[in-house]
Amino acid sequence: MISLEVKGLSQAQARLAAGVREMPGLGERVVRSLSILMRRKLVERMSAPLHTSPFWGRTSPPGLAYLGVRSGQSRDRISPGGIIFRRGKEITSSVGSPDRHVAFLEKGGTIFGHQFLRIPTAAAQTPAGVDRNAGVSIRSLKDVFLMRSRTGPLWAVRQVGKRNRGAPHARGAREGPRGGSKLEFLYLLKRSVKQRGRFIFKLTAAEVDAAAPGIAQTHVAAFVRTVNG
């Protein structure tokens, strides 16, 4: 008589039962990991160092995919990620921003001022590159007046000290005593500005999509190890 003895059947059944219980959570863990990864990459793309110009001050880096950080408020308002939504068998998570200007920066386009848009130079910026007079009318700024430069643009300027040879010469500037005065250019005023798209969300989504199979495989492997004990 030949017989086979099977050992550990109860343990195997327990592990399989645990696997069945854990299976619905596997998909959630994968989606949650991808969501957290997406937010981290978005924050990285919105944290690029600003470029510095002697005249224009702090500006965002050139090209696509990155934004320079100024106050950090737009970056901080990116949703946290890791929040799971279920609709039937579908598991989703989303990462985004509630700010309209972030959506505008994503695709780009033309923005129009009520009268004029004002673009601050270095002289009108804080060390972080933020307009130091944000929310304040140019009319209320002391000793500031409007004038057109020889090339045509309209500027908000202040006349101080001696004229800086490196600054654009403005039509109507008067020479002061002992070599004259310089015009401190504070704002360029424009009716509209065309903004190129940065496509930060689009490029981040593509990057996370490429990483998804590897992340899913890691979670599946951990799940299999749990079931196998």
Image (cartoon, rainbow, N blue to C red):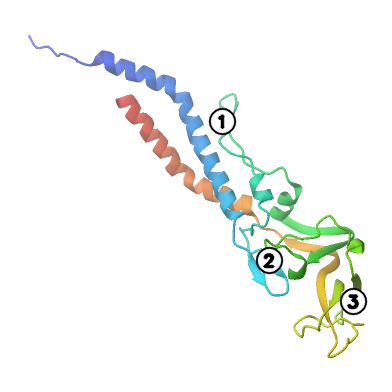
Q: In this view, does 90 lie to the left or right of 142?
A: left
Which residue is at 85% across, 59% downward?
A: 112
Residue 172 % position (x, y)? 92, 82
Residue 89 % position (x, y)? 56, 25
Residue under label 3, please give it: 148
Three-letter code for the amino acid on which mark 1 is drawn: Ile
The local crowd at label 2, few if under 14, some if 14 to 19, many if 20 or more residues have their Cα within 10 Å, is: many
Three-letter code for the amino acid on which mark 3 is drawn: Arg
Nearer to the camera, 181 or 194: 181
Q: What residue occupies the far left of the structure in this picture? A: 1
Between the residue at mark 2 and the residue at mark 1, the CA separation in whole angstroms equals: 42 Å
Mark 3 residue element: strand
Residue under label 1, please give it: 91
Between the residue at mark 3 and the residue at mark 1, the CA separation in whole angstroms equals: 58 Å
Task: Report the disc number at residue 58.
Answer: 2
The local crowd at label 1, few if under 14, some if 14 to 19, many if 20 or more residues have their Cα within 10 Å, is: some
Quadrant of the snapshot with the C terminus = top left
Task: Report the disc number at residue 224.
Answer: none
